[in-house]
C-alpha cells in the first residue's frame, strides 16, 4: 500500500494510557510521574510566531483559576502539538487523537510547570514522550526504512509528469505527493531519530532543550541529530528535485505511481483538505537563496515551507468535553 509495496495492517488503538483533567479524580501514580521532568533554563530562544501571547503568563493565570486564560492557552498550544504529531505519524487522524491526549496531559499537569524552562519546551517534552509511547499505526508500519523507501522512489519515477488531469487537479495532486513523500521520509527514520530531528531541525530547539525534552544528555542528543541528518541526506541529497533542480525526482512524476500504490487518492486528498492547508500546496524547487544552504539546512527548509496546519475543530470539542473547566 505504501513505500514497501505491501498492504498495511489494520489500525490499532493509539491511546497508551488514560489522562484526566483538573476537576477529575487524580491521575495514576505512573501518569503523575510521567510529567515531572527536571528542567533547566533555556540556552537560546526557540523560533516562535511573532505576536504570540505570553504563554507562561497565561499558564500562571490558568493555574490560579482563570478559565479564559486556560482556554486561550490550549488554543495557542493545540496547533503546535498537532503539527508535531502530524509529522511524527504522517496520519491526520492519529495526529488529532494524539493532540487531544497531549492537551489533556498538559491541562492535568499544568500546576506542575515551575517556569524553569519555556512553557513550549515543557509542552514539547510531554508531547514527545507521549508520541514515542503510542502504538505504531498502519502508515508508519508501511515504511520499511530509508533504503526501501529510496528504492521505491527510484523504481516508480515516471519519465514525464502525469498529463491526464486538469491543471487545478494536477497542482493539487503534486502538492499531495510532496507532503506524502517528505512525511514518508520522516517515517523512514527510527522513532528516536525522528523525534530528535523534528525537535532539532524543524522546530529549532537547541541541544539543551532538546536533550531535556527527551531525557538524554546533550551529547546523545547531538549524536542522534547527526544520525538523523545523515539518513535524511541519503534519501534526498542526489534524488529530490525540491532541493536541487539537477536531481531527477519530481513530485508530478510520482503522481500515477502514488495512486497505483494507494498512497494518493485523487477523490480524497489527505493533506490539502486539512485546516490551514490553503491548496494548492507548492511542489517547486527551493528558491535560490535556500539552495545555497548546506544540504542538511536545505532539507529542513523543505519542511519549514509546509502549510501551517491547524488542529481540526474536533480536537477542541473533545477537549471541552473532557475538561469542563475550559467552558468556565
Image (cartoon, rainbow, N blue to C red):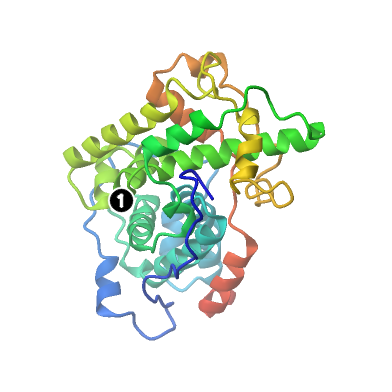
Q: Check the image and report above or below for 60 versus 269.
A: below
Q: Where does residue 216 sit, x and y in percent of width and height? A: 20, 49
**Which residue is pictured at 36% across the width and 74% down the height?**
17
Using the rendered image of the protein, determine whether residue 186 is visible from the camera's viewpoint.
yes
Looking at the picture, tell me which residue is in the foreground, 282 or 28. 282
Looking at the picture, tell me which residue is in the foreground, 51 or 227. 227
Circle 1 sits in a helix, a strand or a loop, which is it?
Answer: loop
Residue located farthest toward the right when viewing the structure as drawn = 166
Q: Is residue 70 left or right of residue 164?
A: left
Looking at the picture, tell me which residue is in the foreground, 69 or 297. 297
Looking at the picture, tell me which residue is in the foreground, 68 or 128. 128
Using the rendered image of the protein, determine whether residue 204 is visible from the camera's viewpoint.
no
**Which residue is pictured at 32% across the width and 36% down the height?**
228
**Which residue is pictured at 31% across the width and 67% down the height?**
112
**Which residue is pictured at 39% across the width and 72% down the height?**
108
Q: Check the image and report above or below for 45 versus 111.
A: above
Callout 1: few (<14), some (14-19), or many (20+) C-alpha neighbours within 10 Å? some
Q: Is residue 306 left or right of residue 147?
A: right
Residue located farthest toward the bottom when viewing the structure as drawn = 25
Circle 1 sits on which residue? 117
Q: Where does residue 43 sit, x and y in percent of width and height? A: 27, 38
Q: Where does residue 191 sit, x and y in percent of width and height? A: 33, 49
Q: Where does residue 92 sit, x and y in percent of width and height? A: 56, 55
How many numbered marks, from 0 up?
1
Q: Is residue 40 left or right of residue 174?
A: left
Q: Quadrant of the C terminus?
A: bottom right
Amino acid at each position: 500500500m505504501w513505500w514497501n509495496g505491501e498492504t498495511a495492517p489494520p489500525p490499532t488503538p493509539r491511546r497508551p494510557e488514560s489522562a484526566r483533567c483538573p476537576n477529575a479524580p487524580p491521575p495514576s501514580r505512573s501518569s503523575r510521574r510521567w510529567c515531572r521532568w527536571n528542567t533547566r533554563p533555556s540556552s537560546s530562544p526557540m523560533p516562535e510566531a511573532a505576536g504570540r501571547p505570553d504563554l507562561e503568563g497565561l499558564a500562571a493565570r490558568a493555574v490560579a483559576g482563570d478559565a479564559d486564560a486556560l482556554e486561550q492557552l490550549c488554543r495557542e498550544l493545540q496547533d503546535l502539538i498537532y503539527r508535531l504529531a502530524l509529522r511524527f505519524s504522517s496520519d491526520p487522524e492519529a495526529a488529532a487523537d494524539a493532540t487531544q491526549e497531549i492537551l489533556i496531559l498538559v491541562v492535568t499537569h499544568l500546576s506542575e510547570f515551575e517556569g524553569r524552562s519555556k512553557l513550549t519546551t515543557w509542552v514539547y517534552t510531554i508531547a514527545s514522550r507521549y508520541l514515542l509511547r503510542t502504538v505504531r499505526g498502519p502508515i508508519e508500519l508501511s515504511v520499511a526504512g530509508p533504503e526501501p523507501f529510496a528504492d521505491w522512489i527510484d523504481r516508480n519515477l515516471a519519465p514525464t509528469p502525469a498529463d491526464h488531469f486538469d491543471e487545478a487537479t494536477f497542482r493539487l495532486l503534486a502538492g499531495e505527493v510532496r507532503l506524502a513523500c517528505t512525511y514518508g521520509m520522516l517515517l523512514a527514520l527510527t522513532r528516536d531519530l525522528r523525534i530528535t530531528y523534528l525537535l532539532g531541525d524543524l522546530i529549532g530547539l537547541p541541544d539543551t532543550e532538546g536533550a531535556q525534552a527527551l531525557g538524554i544528555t546533550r551529547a546523545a542528543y547531538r549524536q542522534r541529530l547527526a544520525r538523523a541528518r545523515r539518513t535524511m541526506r541519503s534519501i534526498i541529497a542526489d534524488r529530490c528535485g525540491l532541493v536541487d533542480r539537477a536531481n531527477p525526482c519530481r513530485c508530478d512524476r510520482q503522481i500515477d505511481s502514488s495512486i497505483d500504490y494507494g498512497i494518493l487518492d485523487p477523490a480524497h486528498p489527505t493533506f490539502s483538505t486539512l485546516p490551514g492547508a490553503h491548496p494548492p500546496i507548492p511542489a517547486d524547487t527551493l528558491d535560490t537563496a535556500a539552495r545555497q544552504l548546506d544540504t542538511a539546512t536545505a532539507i529542513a527548509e523543505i519542511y519549514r515551507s509546509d502549510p501551517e496546519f491547524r488542529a481540526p475543530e474536533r480536537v477542541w470539542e473533545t477537549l471541552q468535553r473532557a475538561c469542563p473547566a475550559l467552558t468556565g
